[in-house]
Amino acid sequence: MSEADTGEAIVEVNYDELIPNNVDLASDTKLQRALENWLPKYVEWWNEAGPEDTGDMEVYLRTAVGVDPKGWAKFGHVRMPEYRWGILLAPKEEGRVIPFGKHKGEPAWQEVPGEYRALLRRLIVVQGDTEPASVEQQRYLSKTAPSLYDMRNLFQVNVEEGRHLWAMVYLLVKYFGRDGREEAQGLLERRSADVDKPRILGAFNEQTPDWLTFFMFTYFTDRDGKMQLESLAQSGFDPLSRSCRFMLTEEAHHMFVGETGVGRVIQRTCEAMHEAGISDVTDIEAVRKLGVIDLPTLQKKVNFHVSVTSDLFGAELSTNAANSFSAGIKGRFAETRIDDDHVLNNDTYKVARVVDGKVVDMEEPALNAINARLLDDYHKDAAGGLGRWNKIISKAGFEFELTLPYKGFHRKIGEFSGHFITPDGEVVSEQQWQDQKDEWLISDADGEYIGSLMKPCLEKGQYANWIAAPRVGINKQPDDYEYVKIN
Ligand SMILES: [Fe+2]
Ligand SMILES: [Fe+2]
């Protein structure tokens, strides 16, 4: 029995071994060998599909040195292929019980329960697949980085998504034997947007062609990651819960990159409009002449990213989600703080459905509505950043508010798919939708304009014209800090 299994929390991470870890990997030589065998294949994947032409760059990255919430990371310049991707689990909670479903109150599982093996493996594979996918989507972005600071943040997100893949692969290889090893291999073989072997979920096959897309992605789509990890952190399968709990501490930085990134775009746009004496924020032509991104275009980007990310939650009414919940495998957001019996045999939940051309809230069995609820929680959670973005706009003296589109807008999956719904939640005809869609979503011309701004700005302390400098440096570094040594 390893130290981790005895319940003693190993807070420090052992960096003396090939694979840094706090799971006492050395005590399980078979597992250690399997993961050491996977490591070179992972590095091969990183070099082939990760950030392009960056092997010589030295990047100011944080590496996890422990799982203690205070001071878990150290910072330093590293070459990314040599980054120490490790396996980190949050400390074991003594006496943890399964918090929901039909096994509620039973001791959390330390091994995979046989009856839920396939279900659990699938959930881990789907979560694992999103991690390398986002790295692949962001492969070319460093070429057009608006600053060294932003380039560094991109790479930080990339190496941590890589580490999240390690977290899921550890679970697959340790707990699922041969098929787990095969799945670990498959995670390195699929590629974002590949015709023959695409990534599993739709949003992870979309392009990330520019930095505005990257910031929107990290704010809105990494937040789906947060919601999924929060739900999996509730899992009765304790190793999954502990993996996800630590991943959440890393995920917070990804959403910070997105929120501050979009916020800095807004700030710069407002500054430029001020200097030019423009008061009409909808005068897109005039604003674009300044080489900044107009606010109506930002609203379209919000609409797109929220809708594509909403599809990641799956169908609002789902027997799969019901089964995972009842089994105690995947809970709800903030499960332990919800005031109900956590079994849900007799509860209902209001689910918006389209009936006779109208959106109607209908009471549905809460068990079937797990995804609907998580999507609602996601929209509530995402609203916070919009409030802060709107404050930047109003502080600058402009009248304009960014809003979240209605959850049924532009959906391809679930209750709203096949319907044409405006950002305000009105059901319209296909013709109306076609006539107006360029008001709601980025047109080709919008995309081209954003693309035209994407020129690298790599002088220390300098920022591209379309984005403001951050208020504070990473790890409190000075304004002109060399976050990336290009070499
Ligand atoms: Fe992740
Ligand atoms: Fe992330």
Image: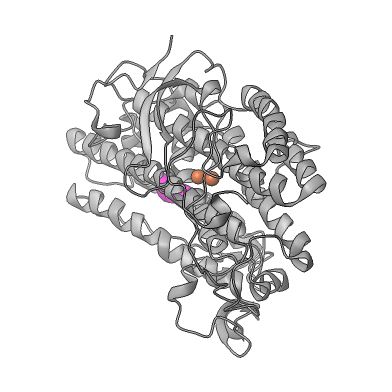
Q: Where is residue 419 in the image (x, y as percent from the top left)?
A: 65, 67
Q: Where is residue 292 in the image (x, y as percent from the top left)?
A: 34, 33
Q: Which residue is painted at 69% across and 47% down in the image?
A: 174
> Where is residue 59 shown, x and y percent of the image?
42, 22
Residue furthest bottom in the image:
346
Please tell me which residue lies in front, 45 or 394.
45
Q: In terms of secondary structure, what is the magenta stretch mainly?
A: helix
Position of residue 92 in the picture relative to residue 294 (left or right): right
Please identify the residue farthest to the top as the structure is shown: 487
Q: Is residue 456 visible?
A: yes
Q: Quadrant of residue 416?
A: bottom right
The vertical placement of 121 against 174, above or below, is below
Identity of the residue drawn at 48% across and 50% down: 246
Quarter of the image where one finds residue 38: top right
Magenta-highlighted residues: 297-302
- In magenta stretch: residue 196: no
Q: In which quarter of the image is the C terminus?
A: top left
Residue 299 is covered by the magenta coloring: yes
- Nearest the eye: 287 or 163: 163
In the displayed structure, would residue 393 be above or below residue 366? above
